[in-house]
Amino acid sequence: MEKIPSVEIQSPPLPSDGKFHVKLVEGRFQNLRRLTSWPLILLFFVMVWIQPDGQPWLLFSFEQRTIFLFGKPLSWHDLPLLSGLMITGGGLLFFLSVGWGRVWCGFACPQSIWTWIFIRIEQWTEGRAQERAKTDQQLFEGTRFFQRGLKHILWLIVAGMTAATFTGYFIPIRDITADLLALQMSPALSAWLVIMTALTYLNAGLVREKICLHACPYSRFQSVMFDSNTRTVSYDAERGEPRAKRRSSDVNSGDCVDCDLCVQVCPTGIDIRDGLQAACIDCAACIDACDSVMDKLQRPKGLIGFRSEAELSNQHNVVIRPKLMGYALVVLSSVLAVTYGFTDTTELLVEIRRDRTTLFTELDDKTICNNYLVKVESFIPSQTMTEISVSGQGRYELFGPRQIDLKQDNSTWLPYRVCTSDLQLARTELEFNFTKPGSVVSKKTTFITASI
């Protein structure tokens, strides 16, 4: 299948300090981006605090060896479910890419969202893009010093809140907050928070578009998923060319008045009029900027818009196509598989070890005993006790605690001895049974009665 060519364009000349100032613009796509990003930001900062019935809603607890996923406790043996969720997310990302380009990057990617937050803080403290570009050439003193300092302080506050919240998905956020207020954080936790704060500050505040241009792998392989029917941010050259300033335009001029506003609002600093580029994140800021100019000139909107190569060539755009439907099938299959997996999660994890030093012990001519170590982990907070018994071919007697306190002995190796006077084969199958409300969990092992 023919691919849309990805054109390598030289970046526009930057100021001497290597920095360009993004101009913020309003419009329907920017409103849509807010409707997408604000709920995601809210969920990120709020979910870590939600604790229905005292249990975290979302927590990857290394200390408890438990994953709390939307209030449901999972064992580390259920990690394949997380892999399934990641496959589902990846399939959905590829589905969107085939249909509408890098809309994830422009509307929902954390790097983009936090970059826009930091740009808004920059505009609030230092003024609009033109003012920032002008004052950057002035001496760093007086009001300018205060504005720049306030900006970096606010950046660090947002970065610190982000780092603490992110860490709260691995360590209970209430514990982090209490330790932070009491200034009793461990060196490891302190170092981690400092590192995460610094990374957030650098990525969203200083590095910004360079992550999208050089570090993000998605920009490099996006062309593999694009085809001639992929709708992505595109410039209608047939309508816009030849470009001409409004005062010098004539009947042969295109609709583009070469105002460069589409370049000024681009967070990655590209000129969309040069064609499809790997750096474009499909944030649609250039669409809103161009539409506002067309409104003022009383010309039709859409000089820049979401279009496919087929549409730009005045051909019919095919919506339902094999590649798009293939990714849709992957997403649907993954959702069904993960949904089914959540119906069969590990609630009681049992491990049994035989005594390796002594295969068996003879108490008399008829009685033989085997020693075992048993560990039981419960992943249901309401389940506090379990009863243990043994069964097999013959009659066995269990020596050890018949009830296990899952709060006190959870994840603790407990010694047990199993004896029998029914001497049969040299090796027989033995089953440990753990009874919990509503079900029984069984674990098989081997009972040895003679040396081999």
Image (tube, grey):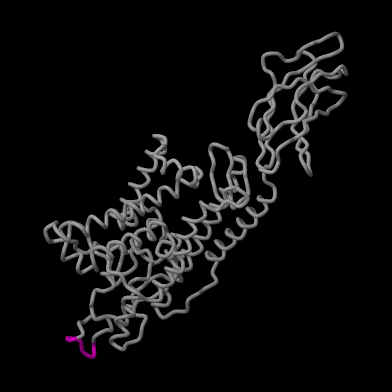
For the point 41% across and 73% down, which residue is it? 31
Residue extending furthest toward the bottom: 251
Residue extending furthest toward the top: 365
Between 281 and 329, which is closer to the camera in this rendering?
281
Residue 132 coordinates in the image, percent (x, y): 20, 65
- Above or below residue 370? Residue 317 is below
Q: Quadrant of the C terminus?
A: top right
Residue 327 shown left or right of residue 286 in the figure: right
Whether residue 298 is in magenta: the answer is no
Residue 352 coordinates in the image, percent (x, y): 69, 27
Q: Quadrant of residue 410?
A: top right
Residue 435 shown left or right of residue 380 in the figure: right
Number of on-image labels: 0
Residue 330 shown left or right of residue 160 in the figure: right
- Above or below residue 347? Residue 290 is below
For the point 42% across and 68% down, which residue is it? 34
For the point 49% across and 56% down, which residue is it? 46
Residue extending furthest toward the left: 139
For the point 45% across and 45% down, which residue is it? 177
Residue 140 coordinates in the image, percent (x, y): 14, 56
Between 249 and 443, which is closer to the camera in this rendering?
443
Numbered range of the magenta stretch: 247-252
Between 137 and 256, which is closer to the camera in this rendering?
137
Whether residue 251 is in magenta: the answer is yes
Between 400 and 211, which is closer to the camera in this rendering?
400
Residue extending furthest toward the front: 182
- Above or below residue 369? Residue 70 is below
- Above or below residue 380? Residue 260 is below
Main SS of the magenta part reads loop
Q: Quadrant of residue 408?
A: top right
Residue 356 coordinates in the image, percent (x, y): 67, 17
